[in-house]
Image (cartoon, grey):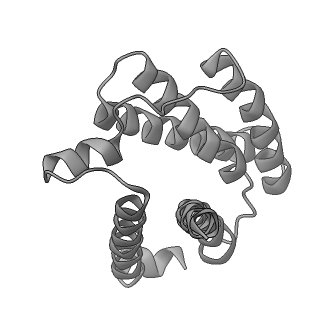
Amino acid sequence: MDYVINLLSVSLYEGLAYGFVTLGVYITFRVLAFPDLTVDGSFPLGGAVAATLIVSGVNPWLATLVAFIAGICAGLATSLLNTKLRINALLAGILMMVSLYSINLAIMGRSNVSVLREATVFKQTARLFGIEPTTTLSIIFMVVLAIVILGILNWFLRTEIGLALR
């Protein structure tokens, strides 16, 4: 029974993480009317950058910020392929997605980087509040993060700039 509960909690945690990918795809497809598949490559890019930096001894918060910037650069590259080189939006996204697969492997230097024994954002946040990091705590953190991000997105899309995007 413990195996099933553990499997469900890990599945919920991963599902919440992939919810952010879905949100990125939703924004590009529905709000911007730009069929961008870069998200499929930039999400793992962020993980590859953060994991490599964390294993190298960089502060997890700084590693997360650098990973965020790497994702921004991937999206910028897709938009430059589309606007400056006049490559079709869907094709530009597919090119970046495929390119980022190889870039991710080059960043990590191997196919997998383990951060199980490393300090992560979740572990540091839990210890900041004097709590032992667990899967349940990570799920709660992800739910709170999802609510905050959805709230900010909802607010932004109702501003003048957000309405202009639609």
Q: Relative to 5, is 88 on the left or the right?
A: right
Q: Residue furthest front?
A: 1
Which quadrant is the N terminus positioned in? bottom right
Return the x and y of residue 137 as percentages of the image width and height: 34, 62
Return the x and y of residue 58 as percentages of the image width and height: 33, 21
In this view, 141 is above or below 62: below
Residue 118 location, quadrant: top left
Q: Residue furthest bottom?
A: 158
Residue 22 location, quadrant: bottom right
Q: How many marks?
A: 0
Foreground of the two, 116 or 3? 3
Foreground of the two, 21 or 134? 134
Which quadrant is the C terminus positioned in? bottom right
What residue is rendered at 44% in x and 37% in y? 69
Foreground of the two, 31 or 23? 23
In this view, 164 is above or below 3: below
What residue is rendered at 42% in x and 65% in y? 139
Q: Relative to 115, is 64 on the left or the right?
A: left
What residue is rendered at 73% in x and 40% in y? 81
Foreground of the two, 48 or 81? 48
Residue 3 location, quadrant: bottom right
Return the x and y of residue 78 as percentages of the image width and height: 68, 43
Return the x and y of residue 18 as percentages of the image width and height: 61, 61
